Image: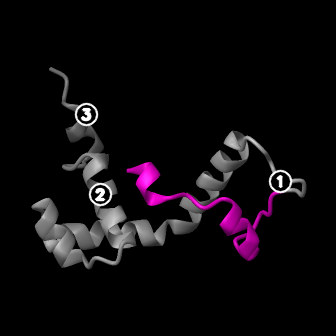
Amino acid sequence: MLLPVLVLARRADVASVIGTALVAKARGWGHRRIAVELGRSAETVRGWLRRFAGRIEAVRVVFTGWCRALAADPPSKPWPRSPADASHSRKCKIDCETLH
């Protein structure tokens, strides 16, 4: 008998629920308010937010790669490889609503 994917992934919540929590956090909500809205425990939501915050640089790298690959009008200068270039962040800003 095969196990459901949720069991194999060891994740009780689907990505859309966690994504909703991330969008709410980006809008300034605290973990307790998000937990109430999603019907999850505050500890669970706090854990999601902390794990995401701890991996933010890796997420930035992935999204920058997507921006490069999908840009209809790539910039004339090479894409920066570091978040230190603030103008790069503005060029490749991902709106949370688009991801949700």
Q: Residue 72 placed where, x, y %?
A: 73, 40
Front-lying residue, 36 or 50: 36
Local packing at callout 3 (Cα closer than 10 Å; few below 14, some 14-19, many 20+) is few
Q: Are marks 3 and 2 in contact (CB under 8 Å)?
A: no
Name which of mark 3 and mark 2 comes first in the sequence.
3
Q: Which mark is residue 75?
A: 1
Amino acid of disc 3? Val
Residue ranking furthest to the right: 77
- Dot 2 falls on a residue whose secondary structure is helix
Disc 3 to disc 2, C-alpha distance: 21 Å
Q: Place residue 51 in its image quadrant.
A: bottom left
**Left or right: 23, with 99 as reference point:** left
Q: Residue 1 placed where, x, y %?
A: 14, 20
Amino acid of disc 1? Pro
Q: Residue 93 placed where, x, y %?
A: 60, 61
Nearer the viewer's eye, disc 3 or disc 1? 1
- Dot 1 falls on a residue whose secondary structure is loop
Q: Residue at (21%, 50%) from the top-left corner?
A: 13
Amino acid of disc 2? Thr
Residue at image mark 3: 5
Nearer the viewer's eye, disc 3 or disc 2? 2
Front-lying residue, 73 or 20: 73
Please say which color scheme the image uses.
one colour
Q: In the image, is residue 98 part of the stretch drawn in magenta?
A: yes
Q: Residue at (64%, 46%) from the top-left corner?
A: 66
Disc 1 to disc 2, C-alpha distance: 31 Å
- Dot 3 falls on a residue whose secondary structure is helix
Name which of mark 1 and mark 2 comes first in the sequence.
2
Stretch in magenta = 79-100
Residue at image mark 2: 20
Nearer the viewer's eye, disc 1 or disc 2? 1
